[in-house]
Image (cartoon, helix red, strand yellow):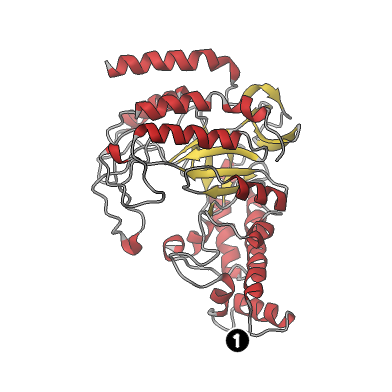
Amino acid sequence: MRTLIGICLFVFIAIPLQGQYDTYGGWVKLKGKKTGFFHTEQIDGRWWLVTPDGNVFLSKGVCTVSPLRDRHAPALTREEREKWAKQTADQLKGWHFNTISLYGTKGSLPGMAYTAMLNFAASQQPNVWRDGIVLDYFSPQFQEAVERQAASLCRPLANDPWLIGYYPDSELKWFPDIRGSDTVLQSFLKKPPASPGYQRALAFLKERGHTPDTMTEEDKLAFLEVAAAQYGKVCTEAIRRNDPNHLILGMRFNEHVPIPLSRGLGPYFDVLSLDIYEYRAPLYKLDEMNRLTGKPTLITEFSFKAMDSGNPNTVGAGEPVLTQQDRADLFAAYVEDLANLPSCVGYHWFQYRDQPKQSSGRSPGGFGAENSNYGLVQIDGTPWDLLTRRVAEENGAVEALHAKSRSR
């Protein structure tokens, strides 16, 4: 009975909207330039992505789409994986998603656009994200690592029309957080005295008439912009040398985005992206990022988890809500807020499948083993019906809403 209801719901929702979208999931009622690749474009004061066919596109994505229940699940055969990929692509398109986000790969789901993670920083040193390591962005070693990774990952994808663009990294440590209390300036001043980063930090303070012993809070913020600009320059130049065709989607800021960080990276990225787990969309922060840089914005992680799921919800970002109805209502309010924001070009839900309730978060450093009800589907693949019905409804209406949005 559940399967029959699901099929009927898919037919009811998906068929009337089929003519609204092109092959890539772009909205055919509003045209941009046809370039053969995804790009950004501002039309009538509103930012959009535009598909290779020239139709406007809001990236409605899902993160971490995988057939496996957890890392201990048995590997699937090639035939099983291909069958799962086809069924899941049809399922997500039925809910009017159009993007595989975060760990998408070429052809991972047939007929769905994707974004690619480059992990430039981790390619030089493992556990950069987990341990909050601030690398020396001025060093030849960082530049060489970035170039190697860009040549390895970007060059083979340079002509793929289904690729939207790249994230150079994810949630690097740019400011004090649970991974450490040092600012970027303080981190650079702890590097070896002969290192390029230490020498750049020392020269920066000298130019401002200060020393490591007399540096101010203003110095710390100003150097953040300097270091961010260097990171952005190195990453962007490496990507462009190996792939001139695709977008640079930002490095997925982790909630708080100091103004100097937006200013430092803004000239180098095509889109500024933000991961944030609040009950409502962070409109003020997205507005600020757009005003400072003139670039569109993208929510690359958001989610809501509910206590009626049977999951503990004790590990992972965001405060849990009570019910699946709350998840559905919050999704609707969140994406309607974003659709009404002229600078926003999409949103990516975290994630496809619930996480195992047995996870405790006790991986090294306390990261990476979450036990939360983030999924569109349960651990066994059964959809959360209240949520996915509302998701399909909202996803099918956001382009028309965005087209009517007004500048704030």
Question: Relative to residue 148, is residue 348 depicted above or below?
Answer: above
What is the quadrant of residue 127 in the picture?
A: bottom left
The quadrant the N terminus occupies is: top left
Residue 114 visible (yes or no): no
Residue at the spot 46% in from the left edge and 47% down from the top edge: 277
Circle 1: residue type: Asp
Q: Which residue is mark 1?
A: 213
Residue 256 at x, y = what percent?
A: 55, 57
State left or right for residue 92 relative to residue 398: left
Observer-nearest of 185 and 72 = 185
Quick one: label 1, few (<14), some, or many (20+) residues within 10 Å? few
Residue 378 at x, y = what percent?
A: 31, 34
Number of numbered callouts drawn: 1
Question: Relative to residue 216, is residue 344 depicted above or below?
Answer: above
Which structural element holds mark 1? Answer: loop
Observer-nearest of 94 and 331 = 331
The quadrant the C terminus occupies is: top right
Residue 135 at x, y = what percent?
A: 54, 68
Question: Relative to residue 227, is residue 42 depicted above or below?
Answer: above
